[in-house]
Image (cartoon, helix red, strand yellow):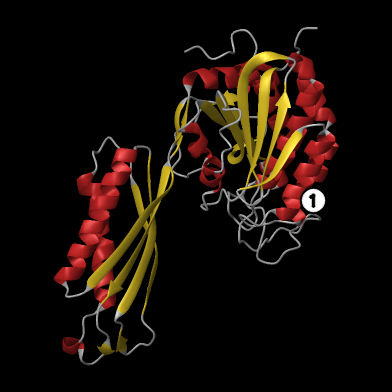
Amino acid sequence: MSLDLHQVRKDAYALYDQLIAWRRDLHKHPELGFEERRTATIIAEHLTSLGLHVQTGVARTGVVALLEGSQEGPTLLLRFDMDALPVEEENDVPYRSEYPGRMHACGHDGHVAIGLATATLLVRYREHLRGRVKFVFQPAEEGMGGALRMIQEGVLENPKPDWAFGLHLWNPIPVGKVVVQSGPLMAAAGRFDIDVVGRGGHGAQPHLTVDALVTAAHIVTGLQTIVSRNVDPLESLVLTVGELHSGSAFNIIPGQATLRGTMRTFNMNTMHMAQARLRSLAEGVAQAYGARADVRTEVIAPPVINDEQATRVVRRAAEAIVGPENIVTIKPVMVSEDMAEFLTRVPGCFFLVGARNEEKGIVYGHHHPRFDIDEDALPIGAALMTATALLAGQNGGERKE
């Protein structure tokens, strides 16, 4: 029997009610990074019921399962993230978060539901599956290094994937549209922390102090020159100071100040240059004002860069599932995604599934307390991921070296 991707789409929509039930249950019970124990239990129980070999406790709460196809072919890694955010939900919906100060404000609840549906569908379509699929349900995507920790614990071994695929429900674009494009899609993310140490004193006696707040203010101003004077104008770098903490009273000159911020770029050489310049500039400004700057920097995630051949496979799937007219491209965005950790080691494609619907009032961006998704995106995501896995092992879909 030949593979019918239109039937795959129908089968995904047949799971619509189950997809919503999964997603809403997870939305009501959000769990933060490395704490996704209830979520992991639900995932493991369903995958086990499908007859898959399931491994739990990977990177503390991650779940990995393996599905063997009916014929030889490539090994595919399909990744779905699980964690929520420390955000107080403001939506008045039946599935509102039951945990104060926590909500699924980025769509990862939907990603888990899509992953469970994809596993369900691929088991049904096992006779069409060439190779094997490694399902990776990842904890702690939100800046906590969950992907890297899973890699360190061997998720890319036994068997080693030939391709990696992932998706993200994406509210900037309407439901029914998908973004499938090769090359850079999301930026690398870095973090910096700067502690300025001076000497505090009375606000009326500045000559007896080393003002950490004034020093920090000049550091903030100076950091902007990294973008304007150290980066090739044809390259991109965002440098944002998001926190500045200093002082305790109106008439006291503070002896300490703390700055925290982020850097975003598509070029890791630019990232490393910016880290070096930030350190040099902060330490130099502090020294000029008689203070000291202790600087810490780290790379949270590399850029998401999609492999051209893997992207062609996803595009073929998208043409069948949503139609060529609903495949769109966007300018690369400066947000980051640690799916990039997999894509720097395994060629693959990360694609975006539209989840916005203005008629339903679903217009708020990711990480907003009123974020929500149009649940009509769920079967689209499941159908796309299932079709991608099936096509990746078919003639014309196998990777050519």
Q: Position of residue 392 (x, y in %)?
A: 62, 17
Q: Residue at x 68, y 61 (%)?
A: 90
Q: Position of residue 282 (x, y in %)?
A: 24, 62
Left or right for 167, reference 53: left
Q: Nearer the viewer, residue 129 or 118?
A: 129
Total labels: the figure holds 1
Q: Position of residue 335 (x, y in %)?
A: 47, 45
Q: Nearer the viewer, residue 231 or 341?
A: 341
Q: Residue at x 76, y 22 (%)?
A: 9
Left or right for 87, reference 97: left
Left or right for 232, reference 350: left
The residue that mark 1 highlights is 25
Q: Residue at x 49, y 32 (%)?
A: 343
Q: In which quadrant of the rendered view does residue 179 lie?
A: top right
Using a 10 Å C-alpha cutoff, classify the residue at mark 1 as few (fewer than 14 neighbours), some (14 to 19) or many (20 or more). Answer: some
Left or right for 95, reference 133: right
Quick check: can you spot residue 179? Answer: no
Q: Is residue 45 above or below residue 379?
A: below
Q: Quadrant of the N terminus?
A: top right
Q: Is residue 6 above or below residue 369?
A: above
Q: In which quadrant of the rendered view does residue 240 lie?
A: bottom left
Tag 1: amino acid = Asp
Q: Residue at x 78, y 19 (%)?
A: 125
Q: Position of residue 231 (x, y in %)?
A: 24, 43
